[in-house]
Image (cartoon, rainbow, N blue to C red):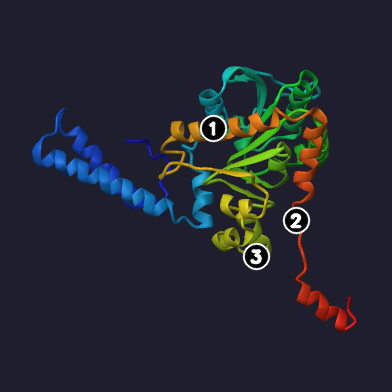
């Protein structure tokens, strides 16, 4: 059975079944008769319960899944999807930020540039990688590698997984806002295909700093929003404990964002989440990247920039209902 890592409250029925299955498997090398039937029944029940629970997750529960300690991070996906990855370090101005992974690789024989937020698996790694929250030098490293890709005509694959850019004083002193703004500007004009993949958390400008692409893919149980649910709850309700309410109001799930046109494709995860089945999740993500990258490679450099412009230009568009407008005109308000 997969290692469940962090225990989520709503997963308790799944964990109990997994414990029973492990107990049976550990009881002897071979199972026969009633014990074999019991194992098969438990496995069938396990599959059913997983589908039921993961088919009806709330927005807040999806946020919890996105933060799971066993969920694949950027470096994990790089190892499962790409070949011959060579990491490039440093921003050529201040330092190397380990919260932002960047380098060159092969994607089914296509040379590409890869960038992504990187969280740590252990406490030591998490602290060294600042829990996936980049400093300005992280975003400057990312754009350095992206500009290198642009110079040599390499597609860019970006993995978003951060609670947000680091908000500390030292980050502000070194120009956090300017670094992110510069990335937004430059990414909008790069003349190569850019495929963005939201694999876990997509927090605010920290996510968007490497999130301007021609196509945006999002894992089924990831979240992407202008602010975290806790931050939103603290501002609106003056109570961070009401994060579950804020999560629903923010419309931060893949399904919500697909309906709003922010996300181009939802990448399905096996019932039970990517933290239980990383290889299957990586295979689904790779297929999504390949499909969209193949389409984008047929566009000219000029058309790629125009395609990206159109994608972001139409976000947030709205239409006023005709009846409402006519009523306003009749009342002299339009």
Secondary structure at numbered mark 1: helix
Secondary structure at numbered mark 2: loop
Residue drawn where x is 50% and y is 49% of the image:
64
The residue that mark 3 highlights is 238
The residue that mark 1 highlights is 287
- Give the mark nearer the N terminus: 3 vs 1: 3
Q: Residues within 10 Å of mark 2 (few under 14, many from 20)?
A: few
Q: Residues within 10 Å of mark 1 (few under 14, many from 20)?
A: some
Q: Position of residue 329 (x, y in %)?
A: 87, 79
Q: CA distance from mark 2 to mark 1?
A: 29 Å
Q: Residues within 10 Å of mark 3 (few under 14, many from 20)?
A: few
186 displayed left or right of 46 = right
Residue placed most toward the observer, 247 or 283: 283
Give the position of the N terminus as an image quadrant: top left
Q: CA distance from mark 3 to mark 1?
A: 43 Å
Secondary structure at numbered mark 3: loop
Residue reaching furthest to the front = 298
Residue placed most toward the observer, 225 or 84: 84
324 displayed left or right of 122 = right
Residue reaching furthest to the left = 33
Q: Choose top left, top right, bottom left or bottom right for residue 285.
A: top right
- Give the mark nearer the N terminus: 3 vs 2: 3
Q: Position of residue 290 (x, y in %)?
A: 59, 30
User: Is residue 222 among what the camera can see?
Assistant: yes
Residue placed most toward the observer, 138 or 58: 58
- Pointers 3 and 2 in contact (C-beta within 8 Å): no
The residue that mark 2 highlights is 316
Residue drawn where x is 75% and y is 22% of the image:
149
On screen, 78 above or below 333?
above
Give the position of the C terminus as an image quadrant: bottom right
72 displayed left or right of 137 = left
């Amino acid at each position: 059975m997969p290692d469940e890592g962090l225990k989520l409250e709503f997963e308790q029925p799944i964990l109990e079944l997994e414990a029973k299955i492990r107990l049976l498997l550990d009881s002897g090398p071979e199972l026969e008769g009633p014990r074999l039937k019991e194992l098969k029944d438990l496995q069938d029940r396990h599959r059913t319960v997983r589908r039921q629970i993961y088919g009806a997750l709330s927005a807040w529960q999806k946020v919890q899944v996105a933060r799971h300690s066993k969920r694949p991070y950027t470096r994990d996906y790089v190892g499962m999807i790409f070949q011959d990855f060579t990491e490039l370090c440093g921003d050529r101005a201040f330092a190397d930020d380990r919260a932002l992974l960047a380098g060159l690789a092969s994607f089914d024989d296509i040379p590409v540039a890869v960038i992504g937020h990187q969280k740590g698996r252990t406490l030591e790694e998490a602290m060294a990688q600042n829990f996936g929250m980049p400093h300005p030098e992280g975003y400057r490293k990312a754009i350095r590698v992206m500009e290198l890709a642009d110079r040599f005509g390499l597609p860019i694959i970006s993995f978003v997984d951060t609670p947000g850019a680091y908000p500390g004083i030292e980050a502000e002193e070194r120009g956090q806002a300017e670094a992110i703004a510069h990335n937004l500007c430059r990414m909008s004009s790069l003349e190569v295909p850019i495929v963005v993949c939201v694999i876990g958390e997509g927090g605010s400008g920290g996510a968007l700093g490497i999130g301007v692409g021609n196509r945006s893919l999002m894992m089924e149980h990831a979240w992407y929003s202008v602010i975290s649910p806790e931050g939103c709850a603290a501002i609106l309700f003056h109570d961070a404990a009401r994060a579950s309410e804020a999560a629903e109001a923010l419309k931060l799930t893949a399904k919500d964002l697909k309906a709003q046109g922010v996300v181009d494709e939802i990448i399905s995860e096996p019932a039970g989440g990517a933290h239980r089945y990383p290889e299957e999740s990586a295979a689904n993500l790779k297929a999504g990247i390949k499909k969209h990258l193949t389409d984008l490679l047929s566009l000219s450099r000029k058309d790629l920039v125009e395609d990206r412009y159109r994608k972001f230009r139409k976000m947030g568009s709205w239409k006023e209902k005709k009846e409402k407008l006519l009523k306003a005109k009749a009342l002299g308000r339009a």
